[in-house]
């Protein structure tokens, strides 16, 4: 029943056309309650994410409402929902800002028991930086580097690999400051970091970001 209901709701949203913005905030609030951002059925939740993407395009959403949706960010670790969840989060970046969204995603997922969730969070953060460019790093370079450093110190190889790549992505837009912020790392990790930074050289004049 929940799946049928969400399928019908998405059809209704499609029918709103350009007037969808008038209903967006009300429906998004409703989605947070029924079926909710953590429904146990992945098909239902995928429909919820699909609805959110449709509703959030061009709409204004408060940070409080964004924070409620970000509680579902652990679904980045679910291969069946990763793409849909990631798309929702990228839309949020456009509305409430990439720095806010990245920070909240990390707060939600950083202590997760499943290392897959942490690793995929790193991958998503790197994709957000790639999509929004220097804007995503503005005033947040130290926090972003600290996220990557935390992952590099974890035992799980998948988390460490994703963290290294994230550090490289930050380096593309931030430059030498990244290496400076890593000076307190162990020598063995510094060697890994240097290798990642070489793979992702600093671009003082990067191309225009794909999203704004």
Image: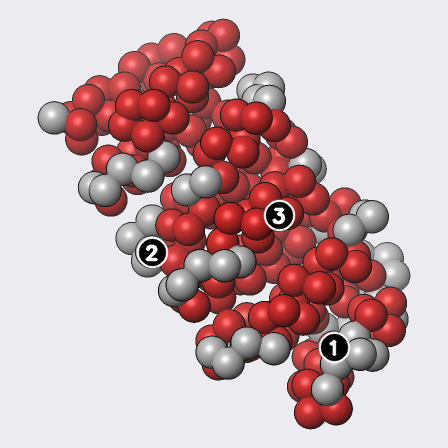
> Which residue shows up at 61% across the image and 28% down it?
63
Q: State the separation of the CA atoms marked 1 and 2.
A: 29 Å
Of mark 1 and mark 2, the one earlier in the sequence is: 2
Residue marked by disc 3:
102
| Mark whose residue sits in front, 1 or 3 | 3
Give the vertical position of 27 relative to 46 (above or below): above
Residue marked by disc 1:
197
> Which residue shows up at 33% across the image and 49% down it?
81
> Which residue shows up at 42% across the image and 29% down it?
52
Q: State the separation of the CA atoms marked 1 and 3.
A: 21 Å
Percent from the top left, x then y, of residue 184? 80, 79
Q: Nearer the viewer, residue 166 or 11?
A: 166
Q: Is residue 208 visible?
A: no
Residue marked by disc 2:
78
Dot 1 falls on a residue whose secondary structure is: helix
Give the vertical position of 106 relative to 93 (above or below): below
Dot 3 falls on a residue whose secondary structure is: helix
| Mark whose residue sits in front, 1 or 2 | 2
* Relative horizontal placement of residue 71, taking residue 165 as reference (left or right): left
């Amino acid at each position: 029943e929940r799946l049928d209901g969400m399928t019908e709701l998405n059809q209704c949203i499609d029918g709103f056309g350009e007037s969808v913005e008038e209903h967006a905030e009300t429906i998004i609030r409703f989605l947070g309650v029924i079926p909710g951002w953590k429904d146990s059925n992945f098909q239902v939740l995928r429909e919820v994410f699909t609805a959110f993407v449709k509703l959030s395009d061009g709409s204004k959403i408060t940070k409080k409402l964004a924070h409620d949706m970000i509680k579902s960010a652990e679904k980045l670790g679910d291969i069946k929902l990763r793409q849909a969840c990631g798309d929702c989060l990228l839309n949020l970046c456009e509305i409430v800002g990439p720095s806010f969204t990245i920070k909240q995603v990390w707060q939600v997922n950083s202590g997760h028991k499943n290392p897959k969730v942490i690793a995929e969070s790193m991958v998503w953060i790197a994709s957000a930086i790639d999509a929004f460019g220097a804007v995503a790093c503005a005033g947040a370079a130290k926090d972003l580097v600290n996220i990557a450093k935390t992952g590099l110190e974890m035992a799980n190889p998948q988390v460490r690999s994703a963290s290294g790549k994230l550090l490289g992505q930050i380096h593309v837009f931030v430059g030498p400051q990244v290496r400076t912020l890593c000076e307190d790392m162990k020598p063995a990790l510094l060697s890994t970091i240097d290798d990642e930074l070489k793979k992702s050289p600093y671009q003082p004049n990067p191309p225009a970001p794909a999203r704004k």
